[in-house]
Amino acid sequence: MQESKDIEPIVDMQAMRKSRQMHKIRISNFDYQTVASAGGYSPAVLMSNYDEALESEKQQLAKKIEREFYAKADDATTSKISPSVQKFFTEVADNPALIGQLVTLMQNMQPVRK
């Protein structure tokens, strides 16, 4: 179609360079150091100029963070709670009326004086 209208194809070299670097980053599994040294860039320049994440990559990263970070946080929190406290929370979760009784009990408490 371009030939019939005598239009010369335009090649945007910056776009090609950017595309090449972005694909190298993805193929290397986001190994910025290796891609930067191969391309003659510093990792900071590479990250600021050539790393535009695709929406699917953002979603994958979010899932990875949820899976890896929050799972560790849940494990750490659970391991710090004593079995008696865990039992208390289980019983309160099974019987919500206990929360009302606990609140009433706490409202009626007198401060301890030393």
Image (tube, grey):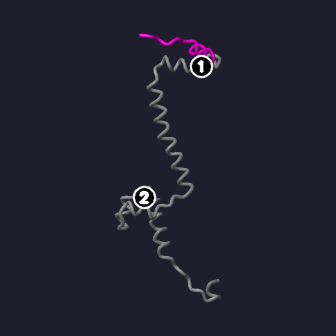
Query: Which circle's residue, 2 or 1, is located before the other in the chain?
Result: 2
Q: Position of residue 21 (x, y in %)?
A: 44, 66
Name which residue type carries label 1: Val
Quarter of the image with the C terminus is top left
Left/right placement of residue 92 relative to residue 30 reads: right
Label 2: which residue? 28
Left/right placement of residue 25 relative to residue 37 reads: right
**Which residue of the protein is positioned furthest toward the front in this rendering?**
113
Q: Residue at x 54, y 17 (%)?
A: 88
Q: Residue at x 43, y 56 (%)?
A: 30
Please provide the residue range marked out in magenta: 100-114
Q: Is residue 84 above or below residue 55?
A: above
Q: Residue at x 54, y 12 (%)?
A: 109
Q: Position of residue 107 (x, y in %)?
A: 58, 15
Left/right placement of residue 65 relative to residue 92 reads: left
**In the rendering, which numbered label is found on residue 92?**
1
Name which residue type carries label 2: Ser
Quarter of the image with the N terminus is bottom right
